[in-house]
Amino acid sequence: MKEQFFHRFLKRFLLAAAALLLAVAVLVILFDPFYHFHGPLFGLKAVVTKSEYQCIGTIRNFSYDSVLCGSSTAENYNNRWFNELFGAKTVKAIKSSGNAADLCYYLQEAFDGHEVKNVFYSLDLFSLEGDPQKNFLDDTMPLYLYDKNPFNDVKYLWNKDVLFEEIPYLLAMNLAGDYDEGASYNWWEYKTFSAKEALSHYERAETIQPEIPKEQYEARLEGNLDLLEEMVAAHPETEFSFLLPPYSLLWWDNAYRNGQAGEYLYARRRIFERLLPYANARIFDFQAKEEVVLDLDNYMDPIHFSQEINHWMAVEAASSDSAFLVKKENAEGKITKMEELFFRIVSEEADRLFESKDS
């Protein structure tokens, strides 16, 4: 009798456990906060705040015709600006501190599943330093969301954080009513942008390191530019807008003091030389805008600027006669202008700033 009771109890328990596991899996598949299986449910806004977990799903499963990609300097763009300015439907592809290989991985995923009309590419100079043969997919990433292996999906379907944190957050943001879908991965709202804040995040080196020889970085630089040039050449139907974001005088001062300034100035020249020949590639150079670069109130640290700067760049990128558009006939002038601003920063502006700070 006891043995029969035990078997009945075990059977009911296993059935109940299986039903519970099935219910959890169905719930995760239905709401799918990482958009691994599908886009947003009808009527729900897409809530995207975790790029490493959500970018790949949005790229594969959302409906769009344009991609906005870049590092954290691109996160404060609002997709809506590009939709309105370009008549586009835009999705973000973001990798914090992303290298060219990382972003090209995302772009290839987009091209594999969509007809892409526009690519808005925030081209950071430091993104050309990485290994062009290696993207960011490694054991530090949630590979079960990337590898298209259905057996790995158990890590997503029965994940307590997804069930008890991500799904409730998705619903809460939708119920709040004022969530802005265009502000995907946006972080500016709770940050302070001021000279004081920017300086608090910069520790100036006392000594100036020798300039890094070209042979130590040229191969990596050219390898990364190969990736970008190959992407542009392979998709002549897509218009690529490369936006060079403005870094503060602190960033340039640091590059000078650690011996990398020559590398970055050379990278700018090679970007122009490699990409300008393509009819479907436009370059917008915002890096020599003195009113931005020299005004630390635009920054929260040496590199991250306010959302107003992002909006200004988006508007300029939509203009066919923008003063920041690089052309073959003005490229050398823009190279010279940035070099002159750089030398002014390291010979005057930075020293003056720190002398007044210390006095």
Image: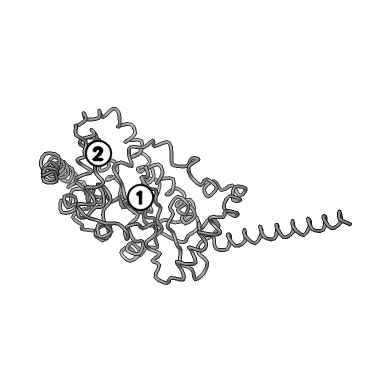
Residue shown at 43% from the left, 52% from the top: 51
Residue 318 shows in the view:
no
Residues marked 2 and 1 touching at CB (< 8 Å): no
Residue shown at 32% from the left, 61% from the top: 189
Residue extending farthest to the right is: 1
Residue 340 on image: x %, y %: 13, 42
Residue 271 occupies quadrant:
top left
Relative to 278, 166 lies left or right: right
**Sequence-first tag of 2 and 1:** 1
Query: Is 294 drawn above or below residue 182 in the view shown?
Result: above
Q: Nearer the viewer, residue 56 or 279?
A: 56
Q: Name the quarter where the C terminus is drawn.
A: top left
Q: Amino acid at mark 2?
A: Tyr
As helix, strand or loop, the secondary structure at mark 1 comes to: strand
Name the residue that disc number 1 marks.
70
Relative to 26, 178 lies left or right: left
Residue shown at 28% from the left, 44% from the top: 277
Residue 115 occupies quadrant:
bottom left
Q: Nearer the viewer, residue 18 or 183?
A: 18
Residue shown at 40% from the left, 41% from the top: 101
Name the residue that disc number 2 marks.
264
Q: Amino acid at mark 1?
A: Gly
